[in-house]
Amino acid sequence: MSKFKGKPGRHTPRKGAAPEPSQPGPLTPPKMDSSPLLPAPPAGNSRDTPRRRPAQLTGFRPAWHRWVAVALLLLALLIIGVNDAMRFTSIVLLPGGHSELYLLLGLVVGAFSGRFFGIFDREL
């Protein structure tokens, strides 16, 4: 107990006096003991993998991915365009002439170029 009872504010003890235990008051929160009802957080072990930041998972593509994606997309458009051009003319530009399988091939190549554009990347 402080000998300055009833007086507001902080009081400095005299030199050599034993420090008094602090009592919770309006400005100091009471000390909380750890509750036995709450489980302790699990301790990490060597098998835990560190969390990656989302910026490392999405949105990062090297420059060569864009070039490959553009080249594949142009190839797909070329296959589809040449196939349709053979439909209306007698010129044979692709083996076997005009075929709907060339249209399917162009669509597959165009869809595969989306992989390099990052369209199918998972968002986290």
Image (spheres, rainbow, N blue to C red):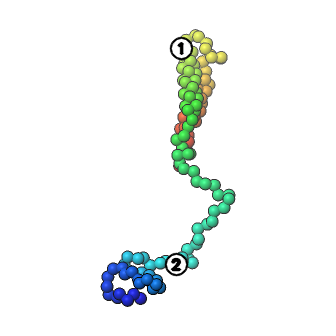
Position of residue 70 relative to residue 16, above or below, is above
Q: Residue at x 57, y 26 (%)?
A: 71
Residue 58 at x, y percent in the picture: 54, 43
Quarter of the figure that contains the N terminus:
bottom left
> How many angstroms separate mark 2 from mark 1 (CA)?
85 Å
Q: Is residue 11 left or right of residue 16?
A: left
Q: Nearer the viewer, residue 106 or 48?
A: 48
Can you tell which quarter of the image residue 26 is in?
bottom left
Position of residue 39 relative to residue 87, above or below, is below
Residue 88 has which mark? 1
The residue sitting at the front extreme is: 15
- Crowd band around label 1 with a 10 angstrom C-alpha radius: few (<14), some (14–19), many (20+): few
- The residue singled out by tag 2 in the image is 33
Residue 79 at x, y percent in the picture: 58, 21
Q: Nearer the viewer, residue 2 or 32?
A: 2
Can you tell which quarter of the image residue 91 is in?
top right
Q: Amino acid at mark 1?
A: Phe
Residue 32 at x, y percent in the picture: 49, 77
- Crowd band around label 2 with a 10 angstrom C-alpha radius: few (<14), some (14–19), many (20+): few
Q: Residue at x 43, y 83 (%)?
A: 15
Q: Amino acid at mark 2?
A: Asp
The residue sitting at the right extreme is: 47
Count of numbered labels shown in the rendering: 2
